[in-house]
Amino acid sequence: MEGKEQLEKSRERIIETIAQNIHLYGLTPSAGRQFGTMFFHDEPLTLDDMTEELGMSKTSMSTSVRALSDLKLVERAWKRGVRKDLYQVKDDWYQSFIDLFSIKWRRSISLHQTAVRKSLNELIKLAENPSITEELKQIVESDIEKLRYMQDYYEWLDRLVDAFEDHDIFDLVPRKEDRQEDKRP
């Protein structure tokens, strides 16, 4: 029985650490506990299984599993003879991170690029307006340069996201298994 208690203590430490850090994914600590609990299960779980194990409501479990699924951290599973929905943690954490990173940054990049493009067009037209004062024209031209800098940054960030999605990032920061393959004769 002593070994089982140590196992549970070890797992609980990891589950609580995940719960404390899951905010980085925009999720609540309860979703983190759910993810951590699912991580240690070798078999997919139903919402009822999770509710029983975590002592949370089925509605809360459903909301959390949907959020985890949207971020591609968990996926639906199928098991012969089971009619309820089953869920399991995705095996590839590297890809899960890439998916999350890409989803969040692509959205942000798109919003920024659209705003920069619109503002840049407006400011270029304003700078060409002969009726504005020289002082205003200098401010507008300064803002145009700032927006061009932002434009360059978001184009670079877009290429960075491409490097993640294309797995080129692993050439720069190899996974452990990639490093070990490089050492083989």
Image: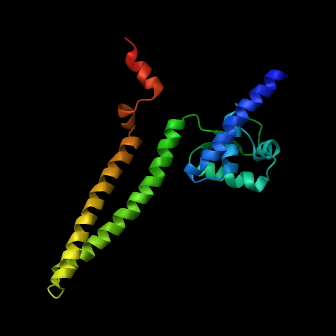
User: Is the residue 180 above or below the residue 123 in the image?
Assistant: above
Answer with the quarter of the image where residue 164 lies.
top left
Q: Is residue 93 left or right of residue 43?
A: left
Q: Is residue 33 left or right of residue 108?
A: right
Residue 17 in picture, x, y percent from top left: 65, 40
Answer with the quarter of the image where residue 91 lies.
top right
Residue 158 in picture, x, y percent from top left: 35, 51
* Residue displayed at 56% across by 46% down: 72
Q: Is residue 164 visible?
A: yes
* Residue displayed at 38% across by 37% down: 169
Q: Is residue 76 visible?
A: no
Answer with the quarter of the image where residue 181 lies.
top left
Q: Nearer the viewer, residue 146 or 156?
A: 146
Residue 86 in picture, x, y percent from top left: 71, 42
Task: Return the residue found at the far front.
Answer: 135
User: Is the residue 115 above or below the residue 185 in the image?
Assistant: below
Q: Is residue 175 left or right of residue 73?
A: left
Residue 145 in picture, x, y percent from top left: 22, 65
Q: Nearer the viewer, residue 72 or 22?
A: 22
Q: Is residue 52 left or right of residue 142?
A: right
* Residue displayed at 27% across by 56% down: 152
Task: Return the residue found at the far top.
Answer: 185
User: Is the residue 49 above or below the residue 61 in the image?
Assistant: above
* Residue displayed at 79% across by 50% down: 56
User: Is the residue 63 above or below the residue 127 in the image?
Assistant: above
